[in-house]
Image (cartoon, rainbow, N blue to C red):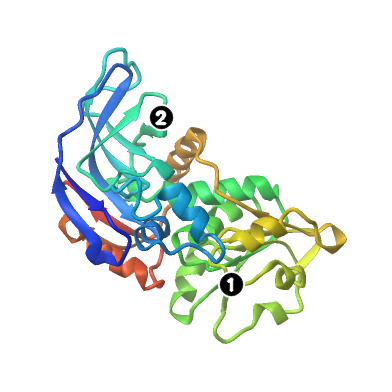
Amino acid sequence: MKAWFARHYGGPDVLRLEEVDKPVPKPGEILVKVHASTVNSADRRIRACDFPPGMKTLGRLALGWSRPRQPILGTELSGVVEAIGQGVRQYSPGEAVYAFPGGKMGAHAEYVMFKEAGPLAHLPEGVSMQTAAALCFGGTTALSYLRRAGVREGQSMLVLGGAGAVGSAMVQLGKLAGAQITATTSAGNLDLVAAFGAGRVIDYRHTDVARLGERFDVVADTVGAMDFATAQRLLKPNGRYLAISGAMKEMLGSLRKGPDGKRMIVGPADERREDVIELGRLAARGQYRPHIDKVYAFTDLPAAHAHADTGHKRGSVVVQVAE
């Protein structure tokens, strides 16, 4: 099979398409033929060794000191069950599925192996392969942080960076949880973010949200646009600042509450099979749909990385691996 390898840290030019042995499923394993995947912020950060301030040493220790320990990137995919190992009961060859390998990665390949109880699910009727491939990176992050923040009906939430994969999921899933959503983005994305469900959309280049004079129950920062000290001016008493792109400073700062019970929530998002399944259900009901910015051929994966590097992708960048 073919797979893209990042055997060194660097720009998109470090990626190499290589031929490797096709895996054979062992008992309890499922081999999935990948139809589509994505290139998201995690992929580009790992490939470039571009970690948040204060996190580079920890990032290298966790992910590989001089090169990515897992050279095949890719956190999410859709595809078809190619083969199953002995004892597998929930899946059969030919069934359409979607999956979220998450931090284990490996989705930028023609085939990926999963345990039967792993982070995959049957593709719901009416959900396309491209949509399914983009469900989980932004969706699981949003669900995880909304759950930690206890977002509920009638609360107000400000989403910083409403057009990205995580931001667009946060707008949609926050609204579904009953929150009243205000979101920021650039002028060219105002209508798009409003279509995701934000009741009000602000062009951050022309309006300083820190000076709005308004208070929110939750500030969800998906792009590292501010710090906790700034966010406190925007939070109601007992409000929560979600530092989704937080660095070491935020992790240390989260150990201490701010005034009036205000607190910061930071750290890796949960990677739960239950969330993977739930996102498929929501997509089938039309309650959550990831926005697809561009679609690249598998052979053009470095170009997809280059687009993600611009920092201006809207929603998800999909890579079409197979028809």
The outermost residue toward the right is: 260
User: Left of 81 or right of it: where is 234?
Assistant: right
Q: Amino acid at mark 1?
A: Ala
Q: Visible in this render: residue 288?
A: no
Q: Residue at x 76, y 68 (%)?
A: 232
SS of the residue at dot 2?
A: loop
How packed is label 2: few (under 14 Cα within 10 Å), some, or many (20 or more)?
A: some
User: Left of 269 or right of it: where is 262?
Assistant: right
Task: Quickly name the residue at label 1.
Answer: 225
SS of the residue at dot 1?
A: loop
Q: Residue at x 31, y 12 (%)?
A: 87
Q: Which tag, 2 or 1, sits closer to the chain's start? A: 2
User: Left of 23 or right of it: where is 293?
Assistant: right
Q: Amino acid at mark 2?
A: Gly
Position of 49 relative to 34 (above/below): below
Q: Residue at x 52, y 64 (%)?
A: 52
Position of 81 relative to 214 (above/below): above
Task: Quickly name the residue at label 2.
Answer: 118
In which image quadrant can residue 206 be found? Answer: bottom right
In which image quadrant can residue 262 be found? Answer: bottom right
Position of 275 relative to 286 (above/below): above
